[in-house]
Amino acid sequence: MTKEAILESIRRGLKRTKLPLDQQAMLAGRTAAHPRHIVPARGQLDLAGRVALFTEYVQREFGTVDHLASLNDVPEAVARYLALQNLPPALVVSPHPALQNLPFGTKPMLDIRFGVSGPGDAVSLQHAFAGIAETGTLMLPSGPTRPTSNNLLPDNALVVLMAERIIASYEDAFDWLRETGGMPRNIMLVTGPSRSADIEQTLELGAHGPRRLHIMIVDGPE
Amino acid sequence: MLETSGAFKENAAGAMADVGLQKALARAKPQFAKKRQAAVDKLPEFEALREVAKNIKNHAIQHLDYYLETYATAVERSGGHVHWCSTAEDARAAVLRICREAGARTVTKGKSMVTEEIALNDYLEANGITPVETDLGEYILQLRHEPPSHIIGPAFHLNREDWEETFRKSHTDLPIDRIFHERRDILTEARAKLREKFLTADVGITGANFLIAETGSSVIVTNEGNGDLTQTLPRVHIVVTGIEKVVPTIEDTLALLRVLARSATGQDMSVYTTFSTGGRQAGDLDGPQEYHVVLLDNGRSGMVGTDFQDMLRCIRCAACMNHCPVYGAVGGHAYGSTYPGPMGAVLTPMLVGIENAGQLPNASTFCGKCESVCPVKIPLPNLMRHWREREFERHLTPTGMRYGLGVWAFFAKRPALYRLATRAAALGLGFFGRKRGGFTKLPLAGGWTAGRDFPAPEGDTFFAQYAARGKKE
């Protein structure tokens, strides 16, 4: 069997047979404990510091940030952003409870559809699981409330991120994710809008993913 | 996959005379080094993280059999399938089988060097399946029927004119006289063309930067988002990757990610870093139904326990070629192999045999820059030296070179004679060249003097001067 042949070839190179059980248990212990390595100091700040650093890095990577006091302000902020960018007031919204409870009724001209974006959708609104201050990175795990397509297909990706969910490092974000259960099918760590430097090593935004990434950081409780 | 490594010298001469290529190299080369340095300067922990990264990969390789089995078990637990493949042929067949079972006509592809290594596209086409490259650089190369010249910037060798010309020739449904005002217009055209492909493909194929034993996840890193669309929209996702990509845990992966993008493009983090684990889960609203991993050996397990084991640490960031004076002078195609630059010079002989790639370990000035920027501290010059030794032992070195080395060794082993001979040469050349200060031609050095003059030595040899000064002090 090919699998055994490959494993045997590796073991020949390592000049040993299959690992004895005690050594296997030791490695299983390392995996179960999944120890952290060096975590950069730069994200280790208080909440205000993390929000500021996150904002700075998102903007440096060509994303835009809006700070809102409460989730109730989101519909207004969305309408304002779309108008400013000359975009039609229509968007597909991920069916996350926090987004489903937004008072979209206050902005009746917004055409809202909850679900998965398709090729015709120009704007999506996603809910972020976490923000990582270290590099201005969003964590967007897939699931019934967060379809992956909404991170990718529309030209304009709008994201709601609760300020209290902005943490120092990737490790912190994955610890939170582990607390929620097993691995989702897909976890995207997103740092800025899509880009390519394949033409003459010159950066151009809007390759295959969103041309614009707009993050609304919300202070209030979820 | 093109394999013309044996003709490196001829390829290099051609590359040096290629005006377009030289323009591309001159533009890009200084950028890479500058951007990497800027990213490194902003992270005080970077040097310590290189050591961490090296140790993680060493640990994984020392227990590669264990972690591969753990990984495969985790993939199957998450509903995915692992296909173990010893050879390129096995891997191609495995991909084709999955595509056939899915009834696929078109497959989209994220950027993957392993699929270049196994020449997957030609094979799929020959079997009636249309592969579509979706990375912008890979896409134009597919239109031009060219191999990549760089492992992370595949179209590194092209200029804007080449892009425009190729798009005009290939996208015949668009007006032939359309104007590309800026680079963005080229990008926008490709984006529109590829959108249709993403939405209609039956299977999506990506590579993997890392495989995680703990969770059975594969990780890809892109800036365009093409890899994500490739693995999200079609019904079946196939990951094609090498066995050396496995690392134990998420935390190990995160440490490696911190050195990867900084070493590669000088970004702190690539735009999209995505962890995929199995197919669609209960309640998921999108994503592939099936998830397959084609796990390729192709000579890698044979590197374990040899002089070349260190090479298995490679995370394919391209820092070595970005900083290499040889790569910077001739570009990637001259290497005539899937993997160019210093990492390619070490890896290629392992994949295709030293008898077919003997020139590559010699395509180095041994300046050591590659090793000094490698995020996992691979001793690349040393590994090239091992290949040179093997090449010499197996009498693969050209006769003239062996003879020359023999003559040099005769003198080198006899220090008194060596000093006498070099002194005679230095004084002789100094005497004959004293009028013009140099030589335009020298016997046995025609190749060297063809491109530059040899300066006439001024004064005595180093040894003679050292001895003379020693007496004075």
Image: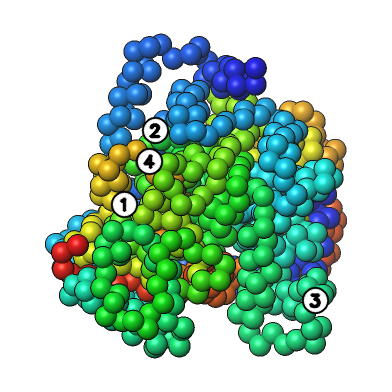
Q: Amino acid at mark 4?
A: Met
Q: Chain of mark 4?
A: A
Question: Which is closer to the viewer, label 4 or label 1?
Answer: 4
* Alpha carbon distance from label 4 to label 3: 44 Å
Q: Earlier in the sequence, mark 4 or mark 1?
A: 1
Q: Chain of mark 2?
A: B
Q: Quadrant of residue B184?
A: bottom right
Where residue A202 sits in the image (x, y, percent)?
A: 57, 74
Tag 2 secondary structure? loop
Mark 2 is surrounded, within 10 Å at the Cα level, by few (under 14), some (14 to 19) or many (20 or more) other residues, namely: many
Count of numbered circles on the image: 4
Q: Where B109 sits versus A69, above or below? A: above
Q: Amino acid at mark 1?
A: Tyr
Question: Which is closer to the viewer, label 3 or label 1?
Answer: 3
Tag 4 secondary structure? loop
Tag 1 secondary structure? helix
In the rendered structure, find residue A170 and report the number of the disc placed on it: 1
Q: Amino acid at mark 2?
A: Glu
Let me know if marks 4 and 3 both belong to one chain. no
Q: Which residue is mark 2?
A: B214
In the rendered structure, find residue B173 and report the number of the disc placed on it: 3
